[in-house]
Image: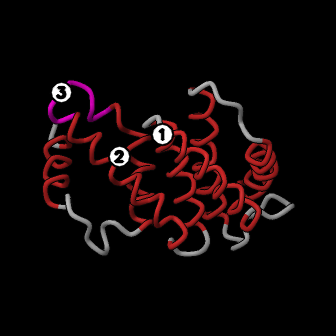
Amino acid sequence: CALPILTQQWLKRYARVTPFVWRPEVTADRFLNLFAHGRFFLANSDLVWRSRFFVSLRDQACLLARMQGEAQAGLPRLKAAAALTLAGLCLSTPRNTVLGLKFLAAEIERQILPDGGHVSRSPEALAEAFRVLCMVRQTLGHAHRAVPPFLQAALERMAPMLRFFRM
């Protein structure tokens, strides 16, 4: 499979911080995809490559923790907070988990309306926010951590709104 080779090339090419590739919203999207599909390209990889990969993830998580607040307002900032939470859970860095959940609570308060809709009123943004928040809830469960009430309440408000848009 070419994916590990492409990932290796990316790690070499962007080892140093560059303006576009390391913006918080881009890093967040990269993290969300890596955490969703990591098993696929970590399977059957050698120890040296896996070690480089996890060092890169650690560096990216540190940068995301510092720059999370600089993500574009709206859905990109919600995704950055979720990605930081996932990074903390998946890379065993409790500080990032706590910080990510704090940012996530603030973004849910800002973006998820009492009726369950997204502040943008975009069904697409609502579906994406729901997907990302479900990833966080599922990962908290796998890590044997309690799902914070603010997260569970937001998902419970969002689900009926998504069913409404599906009709």
Sequence-earlier tag: 3 or 1? 3
The label shown at residue 32 is none
Magenta span: 40-50
Rendered view: 139 above or below 129: above
Q: Secondary structure at mark 2?
A: helix
- Prevailing secondary structure class for the magenta stretch in the rendered image: helix
Q: Quadrant of residue 24?
A: bottom left
Q: Residue at x 30, y 67 (%)?
A: 21
Q: Amino acid at mark 3?
A: Leu
Magenta stretch encompasses residue 30 = no
The first of marks 2 and 3 along the sequence is 3
> Which percent across, then down, holds residue 145?
65, 29
User: Closer to the camera, 4 or 63?
Assistant: 63
> In the image, what residue type sits under mark 1?
Thr
Q: Of residues 158 and 59, which is closer to you in this image?
A: 59
- What residue is pinned by disc 2? 58
**SS under mark 1:** loop
- Could you tell me if the residues under marks 2 and 1 are in contact, i.e. CB atoms within 8 Å? yes
Q: Which residue is mark 3?
A: 47
Q: Residue at x 31, y 73 (%)?
A: 20
- Coordinates of residue 37 in the picture (x, y in percent): 38, 39
Q: Nearer the viewer, residue 163 or 98?
A: 98
Determine the secondary structure under disc 3.
Answer: helix
Front position among marks 2 and 3? 2
Q: Amino acid at mark 2?
A: Arg
Residue 79 % position (x, y): 54, 58
